[in-house]
Image (cartoon, rainbow, N blue to C red):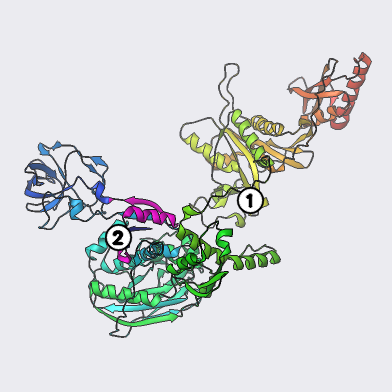
Amino acid sequence: MKFTLSWLRDHLDTDAPLERILATLNTIGLEVEGVEDRAAALAPFRIAYVVEAVQHPNADRLRALKVDIGDGTIRSVVCGAPNARTGMKAVAALPGAFVPGTGITLKAGEIRGVKSEAMLLSSREMGLGDDHSGIVDLPEDAPVGASYAEYAKLGDPVIEISVTPNRGDALAVRGVARDLAAAGIGTLKPWTPAPVAPAYPTPLEWVIDDPRACIQVLGRAVRGVTNGPSPQWMQDRLAAIGLRPINALVDVTNFFTFDLGRPLHVFDVAKVRGKTLTMRLGREGDEYLALNGKTYRPTPEDIVIADEAGVESLAAIVGGETTGCDETTREVFIECALFDPVRIALTGRRHQVHSDARARNERGLDPAAQRAMLEAATRMIIDLCGGEASTISEAGAEPVWQREATLRFERIAGLGGSSIGPDKAVASLQALGFGVTARDDVSVTVSVPSWRNDIASSRSAYRAGGTELAQEPGLDPARAAAAAEGAEAIEAECDLLEEVLRLEGLDAIPSVSLPVASALPLPSLTPRQSRAGVARRLLAARGLAESVTYGFTARATAALFGEVPEALRVENPIAADLDQMRPTPVATLLQAAGRNLARGIPDVALFEIGASYVSPAPEGQLATAAGVRVGHTPRHPLEPSRAVDALDAKGDALAVLLTLGLSPAALTVTTDAPGFYHPGRSGVLRSGPKLPLARFGELHPRVLSALGIDGPAVAFEVLLDSIPEPKRRKKAAPELPAFQPVRRDLAFLADATTPADNLLRAARGAERALIAEVSLFDRYAGDRLPEGKVSLALEVVLQPRERTLTDAEIEAAIVKVVAAVTKATGATLRG
């Protein structure tokens, strides 16, 4: 929210200096974001007189000027502005001055053989607007040599405050002035607009087609207007807060939006088709061109204003181009309406329109000030544009907004920690516009003013709109009822307490430490968070770079990696190609890898600790450590670089699982990886036969082709939520056998389709008390073997614990291993 100091003083009778006003705003909760002194940036600029303006001898589009800035020196200036002429007065900048609109510091120079010792400025070059069609043309009485900032009265500070979502009344200069007056900074000036006598019947009538569309709407026409530029004082105020002056009729609506926090809209009566304007919800086929140049298609949940030809405005959001007012407007119709704030907020979010009107309507307007606002706007339009007013057209009715709230005085100290006395608390509330209806030694009951819809509000004033911010649908009914009852009981009192405390000064509230739960600090990380941190460090150590990608992607891309249920469709995506929650982080990591490849980085290794989305429920958001490798392994002096393969991805996934406490003996590998992996070159790591812990493998060529990746590419996903918590065991001294292990190598002839893991498992289970480890160290397939057969060589480690093994015991153990492997897999021992 921006406003100038002089604008504030139109509503606040005060002689307080700027510093005190700013300090008070901060202490009462209207945080000052910044103060802009426009005069400071324009201090070097002086009013200049153009003594002579002739055609540049060497350039058709330039003029050579002789300029006097009042210091007795005539300077040569080369200027390209089409309006530069002899005898005019303009704004000049000398060498060394910084020009804010261009970001340059001036230097004296020579342009095509003619010296240029100064610069004449346009409005845009000074940062005062968008006009750069020519240099600023000042009136004849402008004093040569004087500071332009002082002449233009730009020394009026622009204050910007941050307004919390509940304080819709503070999005008005008058609302800010009311708060400052209540805090003791001056007196709020009275504001009671006089009624404007009607001169003719209204040419347009309001109709509310659906009670959900509008609560109350007033309208009034003014005919015989002359719509031109608004007066300079209004243009200056709008420009100071960043608004572009358009014309008097439009500027009046913008002025009221900020001055009184009341958005208005004006229709050109001649452009409205028919004699009625209808408040209704959007329909199939509705479409209109808005004032911002964009075309919108309202949904059945949006409020629109329509004439006989169709939609003319997205109500309380943005008006239509078709019925907009311009210099040809001779009769204007003013709209002053009250809408359901929740529906307006949802409409603005749905269409991604952020406007000053929306910001105020979605926070709720003063329901009791409808008629006064319309009268004031009518009077201003007549004063600025002439004409006469019609009768008022009205539909709907003023909602029942009256309500009361009670504050117990003991809550000021008990909850607020403040020593403010009852009399001072009541005086503070009265200063803000609350009326005392009952008081005793214990509490005070007050009536809430109409402009404070955030106090003790159950939104009853807007329930006619039909949109309510409901509780969570799945909430237990008893819990929901208790929550609603509790909120109703304490919310209003807390609202009043907040008002009392902030007027005293938020910095006066004592600081109190939170209670300490225990003498020793509790764990700061959950087991899930700890697992994510361990996985992150491990993958980074393995050479993968951490990435943070979006949790959503294009629907067509997501379909490559799994199902795309409608429940995971993003209703309001930040971009058209980010409309579906990703089934796996592999999807977005591959896109990131593709962007790297397109920029000449051929070998990419990325990982992310993020979510895979399988349903919108909390349990459907699976914590996943995922990674992709594209291209080749790093170059190394001891081994040549090679294309990445499925075993690289398996190694990454297996390393994460082992680091998180899984035993290799507890893991099995199956070949049922999801469809975006390459069949036959992928797998699933499971705990036992059922619980999947990780997926890995080469990516399917179809997926790589769709994403424009030439490959080779591999990926892995570790399902962090599926990893069981390690069992807590008492630490004991490690068992260090006193006897040397015995190692034996066994080569088995097995079917080529037999997984090596089956042999390893069978061998480990043959003699559990004696076998310490079994590992695969060779795989051979060649001409010397029967067709369809492979040789798998295992190393079996026997670890005696009580005594040294005899040859017979070793041989017996090996016989058991061979028998177990043959029985489980059909493999036979090679001779």
- Left or right relative to 699: residue 661: right
Sequence-wise, which precedes: disc 2 or disc 1? 2
Q: Is residue 174 visible?
A: yes
Q: Residue at x 36, y 74 (%)?
A: 373
- Left or right relative to 700: residue 509: left
Using the image, determine if residue 111 lies above or below residue 336: above
What is the count of numbered marks? 2
Q: Nearer the viewer, residue 478 or 133?
A: 478
Q: Residue at x 59, y 24 (%)?
A: 642
Figure quadrant of residue 109: top left
Q: Which residue is mark 1?
A: 563
Q: Is residue 313 magenta?
A: no
Q: Position of residue 206 (x, y in %)?
A: 40, 80
Q: Residue at x 26, y 54 (%)?
A: 129
Q: Which three-letter amino acid code belongs to the residue tagged 2?
A: Asp
Q: Residue furthest right?
A: 808
Using a 10 Å C-alpha cutoff, classify the residue at mark 1 as few (fewer than 14 neighbours), some (14 to 19) or many (20 or more).
few
Q: Position of residue 603 (x, y in %)?
A: 53, 30
The quarter of the image holding the N terminus is bottom left
Residues at discs 2 and 1 in contact (Cβ within 8 Å): no
Q: Is residue 12 magenta?
A: yes
Q: Which residue is mark 2?
A: 15
- Left or right relative to 822: residue 141: left
Q: Kindly report which numbered mark, 2 or 1, lies closer to the viewer in this rendering.
A: 2
Q: Which three-letter amino acid code belongs to the residue tagged 1?
A: Glu
Using the image, determine if residue 94 lies above or below residue 29: above
The quarter of the image holding the C terminus is top right
Q: Nearer the viewer, residue 683 or 46?
A: 46
* Residue bounds of the magenta highlight: 9-37
Using the image, determine if residue 507 lies above or below residue 739: below
Using the image, determine if residue 9 lies above or below residue 399: above
